[in-house]
Image: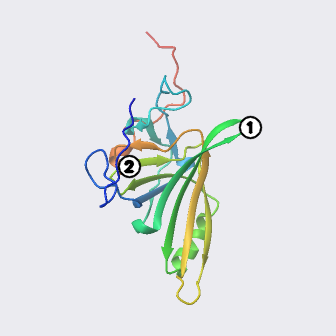
Amino acid sequence: MYLRILDTPSGGLEAAEGEMNAGGITRLRLMPASRLMIELPDLIPTCPGLPDPYIDGRSIFQLEEGDFVDIDVIPKYASYSENLQTNPNGEYYQTQLQLVLPKDRPAVTAWIHRKRGIRWIALFRDRNGFNRLAGTQSHPLRMEVQGGTGTGDGQNARTLTFSANTPFPALYVESLESQDLFANTEFDFAFSFDFNT
């Protein structure tokens, strides 16, 4: 596999597809990790421990009815990072979604208080148009909160950070829409190689 290093023109960094490369997130959807079952793609033979970076709707099962939490995001106030780290047990990715919700208000405070203990799986779209899935049942995202009124010319805002240590980077998905995302059949925990004839 060949990764082309792109020149940085004076007008900005150009992506391989010929489009400008833009930072930030344009859409964010959250689902409690307890409600989804994700069947991870096969591992890439040449990259031990790394699944195929693409996952489709046939591999995502909704275990319980429930809607995604769609959070309005302002691209310049929303970001995603995954940093490769090492500890005595090996390598892992420090995965982090961070967004700023300007103008703290009662509805935001109440939502945070009600949802503070939930572990999440996140779907997000970056400004280059790629959709990704961060977190799994075994490595869900935890929400941390910072906020305040700011002083002087500062901003009154809440910062939400969803983070997890995961064995692989966020996977790419075809769509963020529920009708495209979930498998049409229920996940069968009783699957067996014993077939009746």
Residue occupying image coordinates x 54% and y 39%: 168
- Is 74 displayed left or right of 188 in the figure? left
Is the Cβ of the residue at disc 1 closer than 8 Å to that at disc 2?
no
Q: How is the image coloured?
A: rainbow
* Depicted 106 relative to depicted 10: above or below: below
Asked if residue 178 can be seen in this view, the reply is yes
Mark 1 vs 2, N-terminal side:
1
Considering the numbered disc 1 on the image, is that residue within a helix, a strand or a loop? Answer: loop
Q: Is residue 8 above or below residue 87?
A: below
Q: What percent of the width, then of the height, locates residue 37?
A: 51, 40
Q: Is residue 72 visible?
A: no
Depth check: give the residue in front, 1 or 168: 1
Q: Label 1: how many residues lie within 10 Å, few (<14), some (14-19) or many (20+)?
A: few
Return the x and y of residue 189 as percentages of the image width and height.
54, 31
Instruction: List the single residue furthest toward the left.
Output: 18
**What amino acid type is highlighted by mark number 1?**
Pro
State the quadrant of the N terminus. Answer: top left
Residue 125's label in the rendered image is: none
Q: In this rendering, is residue 89 above or below 32?
A: above
177 in relation to 145, above or below = above
Gap in angstroms between the C-alphas marked 1 and 2: 32 Å
Which kind of residue does numbered mark 2 sit on? Answer: Asn
User: Which residue in the protein does label 1 denote?
Assistant: 88
Identify the residue shown where x is 53% and y is 62%.
98
Q: Position of residue 91 (x, y in %)?
A: 64, 38
Left or right of 131: which side holds 100? right
Tell which residue pokes out farthest to the right in this image: 88
**How many numbered discs?**
2
At horizontal 61% and vertical 50% (from top left) the residue drawn is 164
> Which type of secondary structure does the marked residue at label 2 adopt?
strand
Residue position marked by numbered label 2 in the rendering: 131
